[in-house]
Image (cartoon, rainbow, N blue to C red):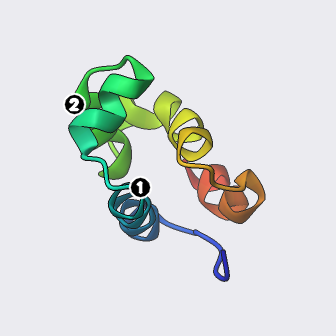
Amino acid sequence: MKEKITNTTEFRRWVKMQVASQEITMAELARQMDIPQTRISDAIHGRSTGNKYIIPIIQKLAGNEDDFTEFLKAI
């Protein structure tokens, strides 16, 4: 990744791009992670109920956690 993710808007955009590039839906991502789709939505919209799913989402979508350091500090 060329840019660091520093806020919820950038995280949401990154997740949507990763899901699209892997040709899956948000529902499929949730299924693969064995969590309710609402938790994916909570995470990408900055709701506190989704915070514990942010790192697993990054990992599932093959992101480099180092690129999310500033964003993770802010949540």
Seen in the image, is 9 located left or right of residue 27?
right
Circle on res. 63: none
Q: Residue at x 62, y 41 (%)?
A: 59
**Residue toward you, 22 or 59:** 22
Q: Tell me which amino acid carries mark 2.
A: Thr
Where is residue 25 drawn, in percent x and y? Answer: 24, 46
Image position of 49 with respect to 44: above or below: above
Q: Tell me which amino acid carries mark 1.
A: Gln
Quarter the N terminus occupies: bottom right
What residue occupies the far top of the structure in this picture? 34
Q: Which residue is mark 2?
A: 38
**Residue toward you, 19 or 72:** 19
**Tag in front: 2 or 1:** 1
Q: To which quarter of the image does residue 33 belong?
A: top left
Say whether disc 2 or disc 1 marks the residue closer to the N-terminus.
1
Q: Residue at x 48, y 31 (%)?
A: 53
Q: Which residue is mark 1?
A: 22
**Residue toward you, 57 or 8:** 57
Q: Residue at x 58, y 69 (%)?
A: 5
